[in-house]
Image (tube, rainbow, N blue to C red):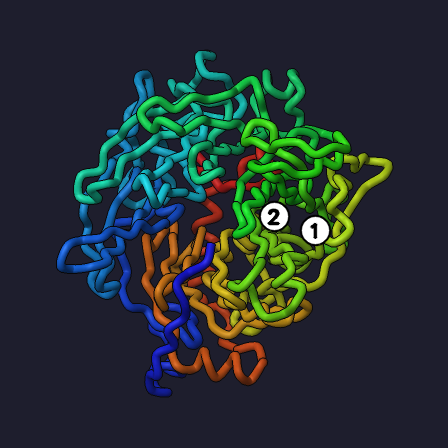
Amino acid sequence: MSGKGLVLGALGASLVFAAPAFGAQKNVELVKQITEAKNATAINFLEYRDGWRGKRTVMLVTGRFGLKSYDIDNPAKPQLLDELSAERLKLEGDPDVDFGPPDTSAPRSTFWQNEDMDVDQDRKLVLLSRDPRAYAGSTTREPGEPDPNGATNIAGVYIVDAKDPEALRLLAFQQLPTGHTTTCVNGCRALWSGGPAATTTQQANGWVGGRPIIVTDLSDPKRPRGYPLQPVDLFRRDGVTAYSHDVQVDDAGIAWVSGDGGTRGYWTDGVHYDPLDRRHRHATALKPIPYGGGGIGPEHTNDENGGFMHNAWRPIGKDAPRDERYRKGELLLMTEEDFGPATEACSKQGKFTIASIKGSLNGEAWKSTPTNKFRMPVVGSWSPYGQEGSRPAGQYTPLANFCSAHYFDVDGSTVTYAWYGEGTRLLDISDPANPRQFAYWRPDDGIVWASYLRDGYIYTADRTRGVDILRLTGGAKAARAAKREVTAPSPSAKQRAFIAAQASELIADPATAGLCFLPAT
């Protein structure tokens, strides 16, 4: 989750304050745009030892196109090394790859979604989570059911060998009843895969609110073994099994599962006290031990179910911000992905939240019920709503609701944050009660899924622009020192038109309660 440190270039004021040609920006500049990575959803990095060159950094980009590898030793000149295309990731029975007409940004039959790509740094493996909606599939139908699109509706995980980033090799595919995100646990000897919404059959069998976590044994990457009959993270929404969306493993080894109903953490290794069994026992990936966490209240999420938490991170230890609560691991950073009406933007839901896990360490979230709910107290929150530099109140196409928190990256007290149509926002979270924006990037033609800070550069995965490589300017350091929010102009007419056009091409998937935008046709 953490990057390798900030590099704030001392560039001239003319760069910092110059009006951008294609949107709004503050204290950040564009270094390079990789347009060939259009429809990117996630990015990760692998480091190699490369003879006389020393360290070599390779960027992996996943999206509807499949998987691409890039040499980024010079971020201003990324070099494409290899690609596993959507065609090569097709399974037997999948319909043909169809990206649609050139003038549309809503592909019809492609790889999908691997929203939060994980890697095994030691074994140089890349994990690609296949959503059942891949290749024209759906969340409602089971594999093998008759499908009007000719889709297989198969979910699972691909294992890719990236020992040679110039020759990516597909080692295996493990079919699972889940597939949207996949995360390494226990040193990547096991995988936790989550999401998406449940099929009609799965709902009838008890997965009422969505698919839970399914474990894969990755001891042998060529022969992964799934455990579909031993699901993890059940009963997460006040006693109801619901959508387990994604997992982040913190520096103490706690696996935080975000989804419908909140974020809950688990021990997956070692001997620990189990607050539900009331005894010490050994935790495993298949039988984890509850640690802490939970949902948050309706005043922050605009719902009564604890919020749809999309991803999370718990800073802890020496790399955490200086506030003692961070160092002790008491605070949890969370994204709620939720889209309100276009005119409300992120004012009532879809926010970034910092909550305290104190009071949640005795299994409270696992004991929560609709009549006796447990909710974590919120310490601070932030959203673009009402900030200068964000779209103002006004008339919008009703479905143009592209304002929600999404994936973020954490480096010390810096959060690099993706906000869909609101671009990439950089926040200082030194004071957890008052997160402050000190830089941002909001192009007129962008829908950003994820933003990452690495070695002083920011990399964004954007469904329309591909990958933007950015760099902070000297003004970022000054803004942080001044402890004030940065400001910027309101969105241009061009961006308003772009967002309206996106609304005509994409709709929020009704099977995921309005989350996850899919082609309208």
Q: Considering depth in this image, is 1 or 117 the residue closer to the camera?
A: 1
Which amino acid type is shown beneath numbered disc 1? Thr
| Relative to 292, 169 lies left or right | left
Is 278 drawn above or below residue 5 in the view shown?
Answer: above
Outermost residue toward the right in this view: 371
Q: Residue at x 46, y 45 (%)?
A: 504
Q: Residue at x 75, y 47 (%)?
A: 360
Q: Quick one: label 1 or label 2, which is nearer the N terminus? A: 1
Based on the displayed image, in which of its 4 quarters is residue 433 positioned? bottom right
State yes or no: discs 1 and 2 in contact (Cβ < 8 Å): yes
Outermost residue toward the left in this view: 52
Asked if one can make out residue 37 in the rendered structure from this viewpoint, the answer is yes
Residue 171 screen position, x and y as percent: 28, 28
Residue 399 screen position, x and y as percent: 55, 48
Label 1 to label 2, Cα distance in Å? 8 Å
| Relative to 25, 358 lies left or right | right
Q: Considering depth in this image, is 347 or 128 the residue closer to the camera?
A: 128
Residue at mark 2 = 338
Count all numbered tags in the image, as a single digit.
Answer: 2
Q: For residue 301, which numbered disc appears in the image?
A: 1
